[in-house]
Image (cartoon, helix red, strand yellow):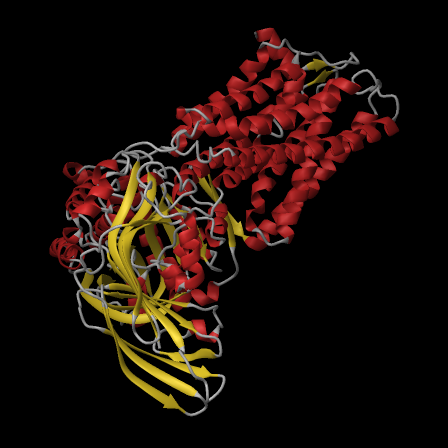
Amino acid sequence: MTSAMSELFSDSTDKKESTKFQWYWAPVYCAIWFLLFYVAVIPSFYSYPETLLIRDEHKYPDQFIGERAQIQLLELASIGIKLTGTVENEVHAINFLRKEIEKIKASARTDLYDIDVNVQYSSGKFMLWGMATSYHNVSNVIVKISPKNSKSESYLLVNSHFDSEVGSPAAADAGVMIVVMLETLRVISISDKPLNNPIVFLFNGAEESNLLAAHGFITQHEWAQNCKALINLDSAGSGGREILFQSGPNHPWLMKYYKKSAVHPYASTIGEELFQNDFIPSDTDFRVFRDYHGLPGLDMAHTLNGYVYHTKYDNFGNLERGTYQTTGENVLALTWALANAKELENPKEYSEGHTVFYDYLGWFMIFYKESTGIAINITSSVCALIAICVSIYMTTKEKYIESAKHVYMKFSIIIAVQILAVSVAMGVTILIGVIVDAMGLTQAWYSEEWLIFGLYFCPMFFTLSMIPALYIHWTKKITSLKLNDTIAFFMHAHCIILVFICLLMTGLSIRSAFFPMIAIFFYAISVILNILAKFIFKGRDYYICIHLLCQLFPFWFYTYLTFAFLKTFIPMQGRDGPTSNPELFISGFTAIMSIHFAGFILPILHKFRKSITLISVFGILTIIFVIIAATPAGFPYKKDVAAQRFYVLHTNRVIHDFDGFVTKNNSGFYIQPVDTRPKTLDDSTFKDAFEQSWIQEECASEVFCGLPLYNTRWMDWKNSSRWIPATTPVFPIETELKLLKKEYLPNAKIRFEFSVKAADRIVIYIDPYSGTKVTDWSFDDTPLKENFATPYFVYHVYSMDTTPLYFWIEFERDSPTYEGPTFRIGVGAHFLYHENDFTEEYKTFLKSFPEWSYATKWIASFNSWMF
C-alpha cells in the first residue's frame, strides 16, 4: 500500500504515459474521503460545550448556566399547549415569566442596574402574507434592564415568543429561547461588567398567531421607539446549534460583533438568501420589526430535527440537550456586545450595505461587506484563470509534447467535454428526481436520509465521471498528453465553469457567489503550488499530491454545508405543501453541491486501472437505491420520528343566497394535506371522501371554495384537500353576522357596517361582484392601495375577549342604477383549542389515522352571504 500511495502522489516525468494505480486502491481512495467527512464534519455539526451546573456557578462568574435554563424549560413546557387567547398562555405562562423575573430582580445588583417590568396588551392592524391582519388584546411581557442613572436613548431589543402552535407544548419553538433570555437577563443583572445601553427583553405572547404581538410592541409600546437593534430568537426544529440566517439588512457592523462574540458560530449568507426567497416555509418576528420599524438585527433559529416542529413531539424530552449551553453562550455574548456597541447610538450612520458571512465547520467565522465580496470573487476568478493559462503554457513546453497547437486544441475539446459532463450530470440527477416523483416514490428519503446518497449523489458522481472517462479511453492512443495532463486539463475546465458561475452570480448581486469562489480560490492555490513545484522538484511530478492536499479544506467546507442543509431542509419538505416538488429541490441541491466538492476529487479516479468499471459502480448503486425506494424501506413516514402531516377540521358550511335563504348546509371533515403525498390514506382513512371533482366544483362556485382556509398558504393547497361527510360539529359559539347599517353615499358609493361574533380566530373573505369595487374599509388598506386581486382575505384574532368585531366596507358601483348584490362575504371561524367540544364521531375519525401520521385538529365553520 505504501508504494501505491507513493505512486499516487508522484509520477516520473520521463514516461510518455503516467503510471496508473491498481483498481483495488480506488475504494480506499473513496473511503479516505468519506472518513475525512466522518471524522471532521459530523462531530463539528454536533459539537456542544459542556453544560454548566448550578452547583458550580461560583466557578463561572458572568457565564451562562445551562442547567438553570433546562430546569426553567421543564416548568414552562409542562404548562402544555399555550395558544394565544388561552388560559395557559395568558395566565399560566405569564405568571411563570413574572415569577422568574421577580427572582432575577431579587438577586440583581440594584446598585448597578434598574430593572423595569411591563405586561402589555395591544390591539392593531397591519398587512402580512397577503392578508389584512388585525388583532385585539394580545399580550407581551417586557423587561428593560438599564445601567443605573443611564440617560441612553438607544436600546437593544432581544425577542422570542412563549406562545405555541395548535397541539404543541412548544419546548423548542420557542420555549428554549425564552429560558435562554431569562438566564441571559439574570447573568447580566448580577454582573459588574460594563453595560453602556439598556436592553429590552420582549417575551412575546402571540407569534404563532401570525406575528401579532411583535407588531403590537414595535408600533405601540413606549420603549419601542428607542430600540435601535434586534436579536430575534426562534425555532424551526428541536434545538441543536442555532443558525444565524438573517443579518441587517444593510448593517454590516452587526456581523462584526457576531464574529467577535459568538462562541459557537453557525451562520450563512446562503441561508439568508434562501429564506428571503421563500425556500423556507416559515417566518419570524424579524419581518415585523424590520418592516414596521426599520429595525436592523440578527435573526437566529434552531433547525435540528425539524420533524417535530409544530407537533406534540416538540416536547422537553425531544430537545437536544446541548442546546441550552450552546445557544445560551452565544446569546449572552451577543447581547452584551451589541448593548455596548458604539454603533447602537445611531445605527443609520453605519448602514453601509449587505454582508457576506459564513462559518467554517463552526470553528471560526468569516464575513465581509458585499463590495469586498465582489472584489474577492473577481480577484479569485482572475487569478485562477491566469494560473490555469500559465499551467497550460508550461505543458506546451514539455519535451514529450508534439506541438503547442495540439495542447491548446485538446484543452478546448476538454472544456467542451467537461461542460457536457456537468450539464448532463445535473440533468440526469434532476431527471431521476422527476422519474422518482412520477413513480409516486417522492420523499422516500424523508425519514431515511441515507437514500439521498444513492438516489441523487451517485448518479451525479457517475455521469460527472463517466463522460470524461470515455473521452480519455477513446483518445488515449491519439494524444501526446500524459494522463496526468489530461486529468489536470479536466480540472482546469471545471474551474473555468465555476469561474463563469461565480462571475454570473456576482453580476446578479447574489451574495452567495462566495460559494463557488471557495472552490476557485483553493484550486487556484493548488495550480500555483504545482507550477512552483515543477521548478523546485525537477524530474518529479507532485501534481496529484498537492492538488488533493489543497482540496481538503474546501471538501470539509462543502460537505459540512451539504450535511447542514440536508438536516435542515429534509424535514421542511414534509410541511411545504402539496404544490411543492421536493424531489426537484433536493436533486437540484445535490447536483449543485456535487459540482463544487466532487468536481475536483472524482477526476483522480481516472488514475486507477479499470476506471470505467469503477465509475459504473455509482450507476449500479443508483439503480439499487431506486429499487429500495420502491420497497417498504422507502416509505417516508415513521411513528414518533417523521410523521406525515394533515390539518383535519371538523367543519360546517352554510351558504346563503341574496335573499338570505340557505342554499347549502353541509358538514364534514375538511382535510388539508401538508406534503406532496396527499393520497397515502385514500384507501383507508379517506375512503369515504368525495371525489376531487367536488372540490373543483366548489372552488368554481364559492368564494375560496366555501372552505375555512386558515391562511393564504392554504389557498395554494386547497385543490389537494379532501372532504368527508360527517354530522354537524358542536360549536362553542355560533357565528353571527349582523348588518348594522347600509348607507348610500354620493358618487355611486355604498357603505355597509357589520358586527360579527364568532371564534377568537376568524377569516373574512370579501368578494365584490363585477361592476363594483372596494374603495375603503376599516381593515388595513394595503390590499386596496396596491390593487390586490379579489377575493380579499382578512384575518383577525381576539385574545381573552368575546366582544364582537365591528367593521365597515365602502364600495363604489359603476352606475347609480346598479341593481343586484354588491358583494359576497364569507366568515370562517376557527376553534383551535376546544377539544372538549369534539364529537365522538370526530374523535373516532381522528383515531383512524395511522400511527405514522400526525393530524393537527380543530373545529371550524364557514358561512357566506350576499349583500
User: Where is residue 93 shown, x and y percent of the image?
Assistant: 16, 54
Q: Which residue lies furthest to the bottom in this view?
A: 746
User: Where is residue 479 shown, x and y percent of the image?
Assistant: 82, 20
Q: Quadrant of residue 744?
A: bottom left
Q: Which of 596 and 439 is in front in this view?
A: 439
**Is any part of residue 149 visible from this angle?**
no
Q: Nearer the viewer, residue 377 or 31?
A: 31
Numbered-mark total: 0
Q: Quadrant of residue 756?
A: bottom left
Look at the picture and state if 814 lies above or below 228: below
User: Where is residue 713 shown, x and y percent of the image?
Assistant: 41, 55
**Is any part of residue 705 visible from this angle?**
yes
Q: Nearer the viewer, residue 211 or 702?
A: 702
Q: Which residue is drawn at 14% across and 57% down?
A: 87
Q: Nearer the viewer, residue 466 or 512?
A: 466
Q: Residue at x 63, y 44 (%)?
A: 502
Which quadrant of the rendered structure holds the N terminus? top right
Q: In which quarter of the image is residue 294?
A: bottom left
Left or right: 800, with 361 as reference point:
left
Look at the picture and state if 14 lies above or below 831: above
Q: Which residue is drawn at 55% across and 37% down?
A: 434
User: Where is residue 567 shown, x and y percent of the image?
Assistant: 41, 36
